[in-house]
Amino acid sequence: MVDSRLDQFIRRIKAQRACLNMAAGLISGMSGPILELGLGNGRTYDHLRELFPARDIYVFERDVAAHPDCIPDETHLLHGDFKETVPGALARIGAPAALIHGDIGSADSARDAELAAWLGPALRSLAAPGAVILSDRAIGDAVWPPEPLPRDVAPGVYFMYRAVALH
Ligand SMILES: C[S@@+](CC[C@H](N)C(=O)[O-])C[C@H]1O[C@@H](n2cnc3c(N)ncnc32)[C@H](O)[C@@H]1O
């Protein structure tokens, strides 16, 4: 039987949570804020708040329409299109990030592919050495080496990279 859209959604969301939970362990020894690209309903943002209560979490979103208790304050919300907010973001967030998570997918696969190809290079300077970069799209193939996924996440469902640490 072919997976329904519901099956695909559930698989993607379970993969997202597994990858975020694994990333929390991977970055536990390093400092730096968390970047969330795509607030949506704010569900993932809420999970990030649970995982990282002591870190600044900066959210990038064009159309803010989340659950009211899942909208960051103005300091932590970079409101606008990624192509306007990402390039100058380092000055705003103050330090490169320990974790960058992008949940940017839409029903328009051509638009998603174009955005994913743009985002990786645009995010390069925002990732601290050793940072984890996670996304529902292959944003980092040309920028960072892949990081092994959690055992229960199938390849291609979620994408995890690690910015090379400087020694
Ligand atoms: C799949 S939703 C994110 C869902 C979110 N993880 C949640 O927990 O609800 C993708 C979000 O990315 C935002 N987005 C997509 N492309 C964008 C762009 N170019 N600039 C800013 N925001 C964008 C959309 O407005 C949408 O809210």
Image: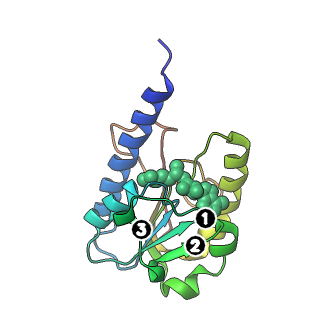
| Residue 90 lies in quadrant | bottom right
Residue flagged by tag 3: what amino acid is it?
Answer: Ile
Total labels drawn:
3
Residue in the image at 33% along x and 61% along y: 46
> Between marks 2 and 3, how big is the CA–CA gap?
11 Å
Residue in the image at 38% along x and 64% along y: 68
**View extreme (top): residue:** 1
The answer to whether any part of residue 4 appears in the image is yes
- Marked residue nearer the N-terminal end (2 or 1): 1
- Marked residue nearer the N-terminal end (1 or 3): 1
Residue in the image at 48% along x and 21% along y: 3
- Quadrant hosting ligand 1: bottom right
**In the rendering, at what x and y percent does residue 96 appear?**
49, 79
Residues marked 2 and 1 touching at CB (< 8 Å): yes
> Between marks 2 and 1, how big is the CA–CA gap?
6 Å
Tell me: residue 11, above or below residue 75. above
Residue flagged by tag 1: what amino acid is it?
Answer: Arg
The quadrant of the rendering that contains the C terminus is bottom left
Residue flagged by tag 2: what amino acid is it?
Answer: His
**In the rendering, at what x and y percent does residue 156 appear?**
52, 38
Residue located beneath label 3 in the image: 71
Kindly identify which numbered label has been placed on residue 79: 2
5 sits to left or right of 44: right
Kindly identify which numbered label has been placed on residue 35: none
Residue located beneath label 1 in the image: 62
**In the rendering, at what x and y percent does residue 112 appear?**
67, 48
| Residue 121 lies in quadrant | bottom right
